[in-house]
């Protein structure tokens, strides 16, 4: 029981806080330990979206609204611990976008950088600043900050891809700008394949200088990524925590493809079990090939092709592949590294 003296100190303190509050002040010592935590502490949770459960809702979205009306017909994947905030991790947004045959998602540009990771279908395009790229399953496509982009589908099949954007980061900085192009489509000024030829073939135009923060290559086709992994596996140099993992890079400077979102593709051979690992970036995974499970903290998630799952910051996880598996992933690691505070922990093996 509090003594009379303690009570009077508490009362005096509370009175003090109450008097400063109208002046928009508050004592640090009441919040210090929730602000400066010994380890990451967030309400972000692990979660999985099984594609066969999500797909009917995507299809229904296609019946309820057009791409043109919606501007972007997307179902947001919301972290269960961050509902109502349009985010899959504390710093990143993810959604599944549907584009039906004959549709155009009209051209716009915004501060937010976006990635597309193709989950289902083949042949729709994303146009970035006047150049189209045709997308196929497993392709990784970027629309860097402030580039005009529209999406279209001239095939006879629906197409679905995962969008990953830095929306929560831009929100945090209060730095969002956006505008619509006056026409549905930005004029096409370069042929399909132009950027890939110029910047994505291990060559650069002589004298080329790219001052921008993002890669000039805007489609990293799965066929090439998969071939690289298949070739490399012959050396069998498996990272205990990641299997065989490659990082998508800007060929001009070796940096990540975009300045705010780091992206990776990894191969886990059949029966491979990764060593426990955690890092200070919350990570979103999209399964491209194979079945397996990931143990995240004390939960177990079974996955197969097209499933999407999320691992919160600093939560230990283990992947187990029951057959050869290929996983795409993205996180804010690039930002944390640039700012000098990214951490990983491989010690619990
Ligand atoms: O394709 O430009 O999922 O602006 C969210 C916002 C996609 C896009 C999203 C966007 C886009």
Image: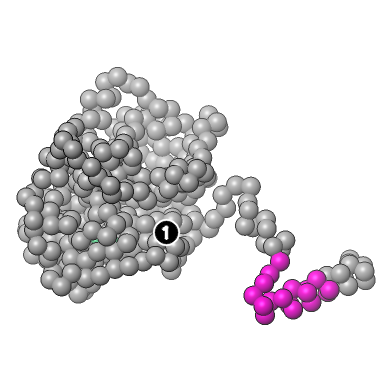
Q: Is mark 1 within 8 Å of ligand 1?
A: no
Extreme-right residue of the structure: 4
Main SS, magenta residues: helix
Q: Is residue 3 left or right of residue 246?
A: right
Whether the magenta-drawn stretch holds residue 18 is answered as yes
| Image location (x, y in percent) of residue 21 | 69, 76
247 or 74, which is in the foreground? 247
Q: How is the image coloured?
A: one colour
Q: Residue at x 72, y 61 (%)?
A: 29
Residue 221 visible in the current orientation: yes
264 or 25, which is in the foreground? 25
Q: How many labels sit on residues?
A: 1
173 or 44, which is in the foreground? 173
Whether the magenta-drawn stretch holds residue 83 is answered as no
Residue 303 visible in the current orientation: no
Magenta segment range? 11-27
| Image location (x, y in percent) of residue 284 | 38, 49
| Image location (x, y in percent) of residue 12 | 84, 73
* Mark 1 surroundings: few (<14), some (14-19) or many (≥20) residues within 10 A: some
| Residue under pointer 1 | 169
Q: Is residue 136 left or right of residue 316?
A: left
Q: Residue at x 31, y 36 (%)?
A: 254
Q: Is residue 102 left or right of residue 326?
A: left
Residue 195: quadrant of the picture: top left
Residue 168: quadrant of the picture: bottom left
Q: Residue at x 51, y 40 (%)?
A: 343
């Amino acid at each position: 029981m509090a003594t009379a003296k303690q009570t009077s100190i508490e009362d005096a303190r509370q009175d003090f806080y109450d008097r400063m509050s109208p002046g928009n002040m508050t004592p640090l010592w009441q919040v210090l330990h929730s602000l400066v935590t010994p380890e990451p502490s967030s309400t972000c949770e692990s979660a999985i979206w099984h594609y066969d459960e999500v797909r009917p809702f995507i299809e229904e979205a296609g019946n309820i609204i057009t791409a043109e009306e919606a501007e972007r017909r997307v179902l947001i994947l919301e972290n269960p611990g961050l509902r109502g905030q349009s985010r899959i991790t504390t710093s990143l947004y993810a959604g599944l976008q549907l584009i039906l045959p004959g549709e155009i998602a009209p051209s716009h540009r915004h501060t937010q950088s976006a990635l597309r990771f193709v989950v289902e279908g083949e042949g729709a395009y994303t146009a970035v600043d006047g150049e189209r790229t045709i997308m196929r399953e497993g392709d990784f496509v970027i629309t860097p900050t402030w580039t005009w982009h529209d999406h279209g589908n001239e095939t006879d099949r629906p197409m679905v891809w995962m969008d990953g954007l830095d929306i929560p980061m831009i929100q945090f900085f209060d730095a969002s700008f956006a505008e619509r192009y006056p026409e549905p489509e930005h004029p096409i000024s370069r042929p399909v394949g132009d950027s890939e030829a110029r910047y994505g073939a291990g060559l650069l135009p002589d004298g080329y200088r790219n001052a921008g923060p993002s890669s000039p290559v805007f489609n990293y086709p799965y066929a090439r990524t998969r071939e690289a992994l298949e070739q490399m596996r012959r050396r069998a140099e498996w990272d205990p925590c990641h299997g065989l993992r490659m990082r998508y890079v800007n060929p001009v400077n070796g940096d990540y493809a975009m300045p705010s979102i780091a992206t990776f593709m990894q191969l886990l051979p059949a029966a491979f079990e990764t060593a426990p690992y955690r890092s200070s970036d919350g990570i979103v995974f999209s399964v491209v090939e194979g079945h397996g499970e990931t143990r995240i903290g004390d939960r177990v998630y079974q996955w197969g092709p097209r499933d999407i799952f999320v691992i919160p910051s600093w939560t230990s996880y283990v992947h187990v592949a029951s057959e050869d598996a290929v996983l795409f992933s993205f996180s804010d690691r690039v930002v944390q590294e640039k700012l000098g505070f990214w951490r990983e922990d491989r010690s619990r093996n």
